[in-house]
């Protein structure tokens, strides 16, 4: 704790605050630290039950940091693996996604990662985890099971599973290894253009993008689509290096500015580009954040790429790590970043909060106009606004309900147990017989679905009862209830196209892992269709990037 205070005292003079203000500020810190210390001491001495010092103080630390912003976090020594996973994408374990379903006693393996220990040693999607090293996992939470599957690299564990279509349980010996999640889970050619999915900005991800880019160019790609949807960011330098694949060396991309001089840094591209002219489309959505926004925003500011999709998340803050006593680490927001046009795209002002303590969004009316290299107007605040807006379709309620329900999982388990192999992932389609089997499976299951309209009616009836009006409107309520009666079979027909896509994706991932899911999704991807259309229309592409007249 003392080291933390000394750090604060050391950096305050750089902020330009007067000597008196600095003295008052330091006194406030010392006073409140003493109060906090004494409160913990009094609790330890007089509280009716024995408190856990580590748990109590850690709760206080997390509450304090939570009042600042969501990105400033404390990692005690026991959680250092979480921090390592955050920055490197690596951990030691078996390499599989596990899932818990309501009403089930055990956790299931949802998806093994390709070429990782779980897949190499024979674990499969749909396996029910009964025991780990002989210990029953019945009734355990997914976090408990996950902790037991992880461990030191090169250590052995035995996972006992129940597999669909197999009468007896199976013991699978697995040797843990360092799991490095792929930053580029898929790249390939699509209708004459190169497609690269970049899922996270972890160490060396720019090299993975570079490798994909080189291979796609060798295959004759006429343009590149870089998919940053769902990419929550990561390492700033990796973002700079990804942009550097497409713009000249020594191009100034990002400036960081904070309270202290050490927070001010200028980032320029460090290497010669792979291709400065190939047409480039960046796909974004509301989950594209931080490093993703640096890539999309920088390429937009330099008029080097067209952004297709929806407005991005709006995170313009930079975090660095500080070592804390007893091997802890503080990840702290130290600066804001500014992209080539000079704008910062941070959407929420965490220094300003309403009466409920909620941080305030910067309204569009208060954002400022900046200009790209060609003179196109762009705005700060609120993330990166796409050049071509493409909104995803609204997911039907029935589709969401089935995707979250165990009935889909059970159907896919049953289907896969009867099909040892399927067509190549590019060619796989669900047949009429397959879909009819799914309909029958769902209708004969315990799957229950309550539509939003039925929920709204139920709420209205409760309000009417509270106001003494229910009896007066009883006939109308009954008539409306009859008209809103849910018809599962009808919905399974109405939303067949969406449901077939969902089922096919769940099946393909069992045989071709994450690559299969990506390819299956590409077949009906609105954003991708818009990107391909744009790259195929050279005139439209160039007109978007041209300077305004």
Image: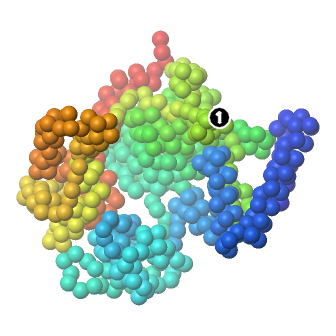
Q: Quadrant of residue 84?
A: bottom right
Residue displayed at 15% across by 40% down: 478
Residue displayed at 18% across by 72% down: 417
> Is residue 417 or residue 30 the one in the foreground?
30
Task: Answer above or below: position of 436 versus 189.
Answer: below
Task: Answer above or below: position of 364 versus 221.
Answer: above
**Image position of 250 (left or right of 202):** right
Q: How is the image coloured?
A: rainbow
The image position of residue 262, as x and y in percent, is 78, 44
* Residue furthest right as drawn: 19
> Is residue 224 or residue 515 the one in the foreground?
515
**Image position of 70 (left or right of 261):** left
* Residue furthest top as drawn: 549
Whether residue 487 is visible: yes
Residue displayed at 38% across by 30% down: 389
**Image position of 424 (left or right of 122):** left
Helix, strand or loop at label 1? It is strand
Whether residue 281 is visible: no
Q: Which residue is mark 1?
A: 352
The image position of residue 96, as x and y in percent, is 40, 69
> Is residue 545 or residue 223 the one in the foreground?
545
Residue displayed at 30% across by 56% down: 404
The image position of residue 63, as x and y in percent, is 64, 54
**Image position of 163 (left or right of 256):** left
Q: How many marks?
A: 1
Q: Quadrant of residue 283?
A: top left
Q: Looking at the figure, which quarter contains the N terminus? A: bottom right
The image position of residue 371, as x and y in percent, is 56, 22
Say few, some or many: other residues with alpha carbon within 10 Å of mark 1 (under 14 / 14 to 19 / 20 or more).
Answer: few
């Amino acid at each position: 704790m003392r080291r933390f205070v000394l750090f604060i005292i050391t950096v305050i003079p750089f902020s330009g605050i007067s000597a008196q203000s600095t003295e008052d500020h330091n006194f406030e810190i010392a006073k409140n630290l003493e109060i906090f210390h004494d409160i913990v001491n009094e609790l330890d001495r007089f509280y009716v039950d024995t408190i856990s010092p580590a748990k109590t103080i850690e709760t206080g630390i997390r509450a304090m940091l939570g009042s600042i912003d969501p990105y400033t976090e404390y990692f005690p020594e026991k959680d250092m693996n979480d921090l390592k996973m955050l920055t490197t994408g690596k951990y030691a374990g078996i390499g599989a996604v596990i899932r818990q379903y309501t009403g089930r006693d055990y956790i299931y393996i949802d998806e093994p990662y390709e070429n990782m220990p779980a897949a190499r040693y024979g674990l499969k999607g749909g396996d029910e985890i009964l025991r780990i090293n002989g210990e029953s996992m019945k009734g355990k939470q997914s976090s408990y099971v996950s902790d037991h599957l992880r461990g030191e690299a090169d250590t052995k564990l035995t996972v006992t599973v129940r597999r669909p279509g197999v009468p007896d349980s199976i013991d699978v010996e697995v040797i843990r290894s360092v799991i490095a999640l792929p930053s580029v889970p898929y790249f390939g050619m699509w209708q004459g253009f190169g497609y690269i999915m970049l899922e996270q900005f972890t160490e060396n991800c720019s090299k993975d993008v570079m490798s994909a880019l080189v291979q796609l160019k060798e295959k004759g790609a006429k343009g590149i689509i870089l998919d940053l949807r769902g990419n929550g960011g990561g390492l700033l330098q990796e973002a700079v290096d990804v942009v550097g694949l497409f713009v000249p060396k020594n191009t100034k991309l990002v400036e960081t500015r904070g309270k202290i001089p050490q927070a001010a840094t200028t980032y320029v591209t460090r290497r010669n580009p792979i291709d400065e002219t190939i047409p480039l489309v960046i796909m974004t959505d509301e989950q594209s954040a931080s490093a993703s926004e640096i890539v999309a925003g920088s390429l937009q500011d330099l008029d080097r790429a067209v952004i297709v999709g929806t407005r991005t998340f709006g995170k313009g803050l930079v975090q660095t790590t500080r070592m804390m006593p007893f091997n802890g680490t503080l990840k702290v927001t130290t600066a804001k970043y500014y992209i080539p046009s000079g704008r910062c795209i941070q959407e929420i002002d965490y220094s300003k909060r309403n009466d409920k303590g909620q941080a305030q969004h910067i309204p569009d009316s208060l954002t400022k106009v900046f200009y790209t290299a060609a003179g196109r107007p762009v705005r700060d605040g609120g993330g990166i606004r796409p050049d071509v807006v493409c909104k995803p379709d609204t997911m039907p309620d029935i589709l969401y309900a089935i995707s979250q329900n165990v009935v889909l999982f059970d159907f896919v388990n049953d289907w896969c147990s009867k099909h040892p192999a399927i067509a190549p992932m590019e060619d796989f389609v669900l047949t009429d017989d397959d879909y009819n089997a799914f309909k029958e499976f769902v209708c004969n299951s315990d799957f229950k679905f309550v539509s939003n309209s039925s929920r709204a009616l139920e709420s209205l009836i409760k309000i009417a009862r509270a106001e003494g009006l229910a009896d007066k409107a009883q006939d109308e309520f009954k008539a409306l209830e009859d008209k809103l009666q849910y018809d599962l079979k009808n919905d399974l027909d109405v939303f067949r196209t969406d449901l077939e896509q969902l089922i096919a994706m769940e099946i393909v991932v069992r045989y071709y892992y994450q690559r299969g899911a990506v390819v299956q999704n590409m077949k009906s991807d609105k954003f991708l269709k818009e990107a391909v259309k744009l790259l195929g229309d050279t005139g439209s592409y160039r007109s978007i990037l041209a300077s305004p007249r």
